[in-house]
Amino acid sequence: MKGLGNLGNIANMVKQAQQIHKKLADIQEELEQVEVTGSSGGGMVTVTMNGKQKIRSIRIDPAVVKADDVAMLEDLVLVAVNEAQDRAQEIAKERMYALTGGISLPGITP
């Protein structure tokens, strides 16, 4: 009868794995809806993206658009995108950390 106990354990593990898979899918869906913003130049350039790091919008103040200083505009956009990505990654890590019940896993620890 010992074998039946092992089957019960395996069935329980499968059930737990299915629950984790469902929670992971829920987190992925939630990250699609989360919006984060990064900005630079005192708000002259603003980038909005979702929690999965897909850019939704870029706003550039017309005052910063100068034909003779494209490099500055490029730098401002780059900084704003990187800031938004950092925020999106932090939110994703927090959600995944909560899913693991506080267990530290590489790339998931907040």
Image (cartoon, grey):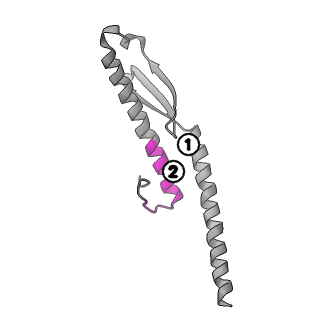
- Mark sitting on residue 104: none
The reply to whether dot 2 and dot 1 touch (C-beta < 8 Å) is yes
Q: CA distance from mark 2 to mark 1?
A: 9 Å
Q: SS at mark 2?
A: helix
User: What x and y, as percent, mark residue 109?
Assistant: 41, 55
Q: What residue type is disc 1 on?
A: Leu
Residue drawn where x is 52% and y is 40% of the image: 52
Can residue 97 be found in the magenta stretch? Answer: yes
**What residue is shown with label 1?**
31
User: What x and y, as percent, mark residue 104?
Assistant: 42, 61
Residue drawn where x is 69% and y is 91% of the image: 1
Q: What residue type is disc 2 on?
A: Arg
Q: Which residues are magenta?
A: 89-105
**What residue is shown with label 2?**
95
User: What x and y, as percent, mark residue 61?
Assistant: 42, 15
Can residue 23 be found in the magenta stretch? Answer: no
User: What x and y, as percent, mark residue 108?
Assistant: 44, 54
Count neighbours of disc 2 (C-alpha within 10 A) and say few if under 14, some if 14 to 19, many if 20 or more.
some
Can you see residue 88?
yes
Q: SS at mark 1?
A: helix
To which quarter of the image does residue 32 belong?
top right
Q: Horizontally, is 91 left or right of 77 in the view?
A: right
Can you see residue 41?
no
> For the view shown, which residue lies furthest in the top direction?
67
To which quarter of the image does residue 83 belong?
top left
